[in-house]
């Protein structure tokens, strides 16, 4: 092999990487499938309304703890062993969830499922740079990224279809066959590495406990804040606990040789910028996937399967435009592509901020197309920026932190969205009602009343029959306006990302394949 020949990647490596992507896809898809079918699970197991959300929260908390720990475990166990163990445990936990007969048992299996599934995303993005030479990393990143962000779009369809055609057990059993295949291929196809298992004895248990406390209390605090209030109930205590544990953890790991989190990586400007862009992208990606079902369910009264079919537009557009993004990535600077991606993605978010109570598939089509076409442009350049120049020994830690930022961005974004929606809609509804009583015909048209229904101020008591007709219309109009404000908030976040992209170094990736080593 000459120095000018590109590095050849064995077929087994591609098969092993495909297995890793399959496992990651199932882990991300599981969150969306279960979210769609929570009412069915609640009814089957007799779970109270006040505890239903913990079916998701238990998974997300354990997932967010596992993501940063993945870097340490990858260095100790290697990609092959950690992936095979992770997807194997995820599959077993899925069977356990399906076999659960009560709330406590289901939550226990969901914790194990979330912890094992949480390792798969950073593992895949580490593998992009560990397994492939530079001229193939764009294609590998596209495959991994496309599946990671496609799952939230496909999830509602899959969850709705399973809920309507099969029992709730299949929400979890659907993971079993792909999990077995991914585990078997990972064991047989991924290369074996000589690793130092003694690293496991250096695990900082105190640091791990601090990290778990920081992330778990933050996740729970963000979950409770929109309903209980940011300054009421346990929310302030949880957020202060998270901050205190985070500061203590930061001071601890910066002094250690083998920390549970390698925060020294943030000294690299490119890595920090990539993580910041990933954080904001997480807000926009997970926020948009959340806002559409809320609107289509509460305002348009659509079922889960219909909602999923409407949301497929984003996923289809993303798949159609991903090859263009991969072609542009090695030929255009990360700065230009990031600016373009966040500008287009933000435009798609802003277009949704003008929805009305009558908006449906047609009105959502073009905003989805625009957002879907920009997803890979918001993912590929920040990934390259954050991980492209990291040394192989630091890559697992860097990938874990990079993916953690996207998840945290999503969690914080959802908390802010819920705060806007459920905090603003009562105020908007009150104002709409007062304007309607004052005889404002424009408000009457806005909420969907027929022309001539309001001819002047209402001076007498409103008849119960009329109130029963008008009040739901006011509530839907108020919720729509609050959702529009949440869309606008996400669009403003993309303006911030565009501004940060201006700080990205204006360099271009090499267009020639990386020279092979003997």
Image (cartoon, rainbow, N blue to C red):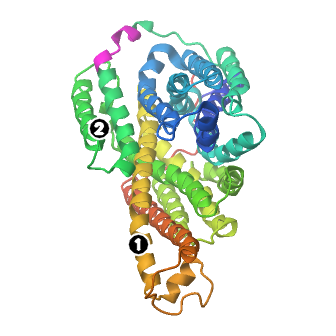
Residue 378: percent from the left, percent from the top? 52, 52
Q: Where the C terminus falls, by quadrant?
A: top right
Decide which of 187, 289 is in the foreground and name it.
289
**Left or right: where does residue 225 sit relative to residue 388?**
left
**Sequence-first disc among 2 and 1:** 2
On whether residue 201 falls in the magenta region, the answer is yes
Is 165 situated left or right of 182 in this image? right
- Could you say which quadrant of the image residue 275 lies in? top left
Q: Mark 1 points at which residue?
A: 430
Closer to us: mark 2 or mark 1?
1
Identify the element where label 2 is drawn: helix
Which x, y percent locates residue 226?
38, 51
Q: Can residue 55 be seen in this view?
A: yes
The residue under the point 35% across, 22% down is 260
Residue located 58% across and 59% down the image: 298
Give residue 419's quadrant in the image.
bottom left
Q: Distance between the residues labelled 2 and 1?
A: 32 Å
Q: Residue at x 52, y 63 (%)?
A: 349
The correct choice, above or below, for 338 with respect to 119 in the image is below
């Amino acid at each position: 092999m000459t120095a000018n020949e590109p590095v050849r990647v064995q077929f087994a490596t591609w098969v092993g990487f495909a297995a890793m992507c399959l496992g990651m896809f199932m882990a991300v898809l599981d969150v969306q499938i279960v979210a769609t079918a929570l009412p069915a699970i609640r009814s089957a197991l007799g779970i109270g309304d006040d505890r239903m959300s913990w079916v998701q929260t238990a998974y997300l908390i354990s997932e967010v703890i596992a993501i940063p720990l993945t870097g340490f475990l990858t260095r100790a166990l290697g990609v092959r062993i950690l992936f095979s163990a992770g997807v194997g445990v995820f599959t077993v936990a899925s069977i356990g969830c399906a076999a659960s007969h009560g709330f406590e048992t289901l939550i226990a299996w969901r914790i194990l499922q979330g912890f094992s599934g949480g390792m798969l995303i950073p593992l895949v993005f580490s593998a992009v740079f560990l397994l492939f030479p530079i001229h193939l990393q764009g294609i590998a990143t596209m495959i991994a990224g496309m599946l990671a962000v496609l799952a939230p779009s496909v999830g509602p369809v899959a969850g709705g279809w399973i809920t309507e055609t099969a029992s709730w057990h299949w929400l979890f059993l659907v993971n079993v066959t792909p999990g077995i295949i991914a585990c078997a291929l990972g064991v047989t196809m991924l290369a074996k590495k000589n690793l130092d298992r003694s690293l496991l004895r250096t695990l900082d248990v105190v640091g791990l406990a601090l990290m778990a406390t920081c992330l778990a209390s933050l996740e729970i605090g963000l979950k409770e804040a929109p309903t209980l209030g940011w300054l009421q109930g346990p929310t302030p205590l949880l957020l202060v606990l998270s901050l205190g544990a985070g500061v203590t953890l930061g001071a601890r790991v910066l002094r250690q040789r083998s920390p549970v989190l390698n925060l020294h990586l943030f000294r690299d400007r490119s890595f920090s910028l990539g993580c910041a862009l990933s954080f904001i992208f997480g807000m926009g990606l997970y926020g948009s996937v959340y806002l559409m079902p809320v609107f289509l369910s509460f305002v348009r009264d659509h079922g889960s399967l219909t909602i999923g079919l409407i949301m497929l537009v984003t996923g289809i557009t993303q798949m159609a435009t991903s090859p263009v993004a991969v072609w542009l990535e090695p030929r255009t600077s990360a700065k230009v592509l990031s600016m373009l991606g966040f500008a287009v993605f933000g435009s798609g978010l802003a277009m949704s901020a003008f929805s009305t109570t009558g908006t449906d598939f047609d009105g959502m089509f073009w905003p989805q197309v625009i957002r879907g076409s920009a997803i890979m442009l918001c993912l590929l350049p920040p990934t390259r920026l954050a991980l492209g120049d990291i040394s192989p020994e630091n890559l697992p830690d860097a990938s874990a932190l990079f993916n953690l930022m996207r998840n945290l961005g999503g969690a914080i974004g959802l908390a802010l969205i819920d705060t806007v929606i459920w905090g603003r809609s009562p105020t908007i509804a009150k104002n709409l009602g007062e304007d309607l009583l004052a005889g404002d015909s424009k408000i009457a048209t806005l909420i969907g009343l027929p022309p001539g229904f309001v001819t002047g101020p209402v001076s007498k008591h409103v008849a119960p029959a009329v109130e029963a007709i008008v009040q739901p219309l006011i509530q839907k109009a108020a919720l729509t306006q609050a959702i529009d404000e949440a869309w606008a908030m996400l669009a403003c976040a993309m303006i911030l990302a565009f501004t940060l992209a201006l700080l990205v170094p204006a360099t271009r990736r090499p267009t020639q394949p990386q020279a092979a080593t003997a």
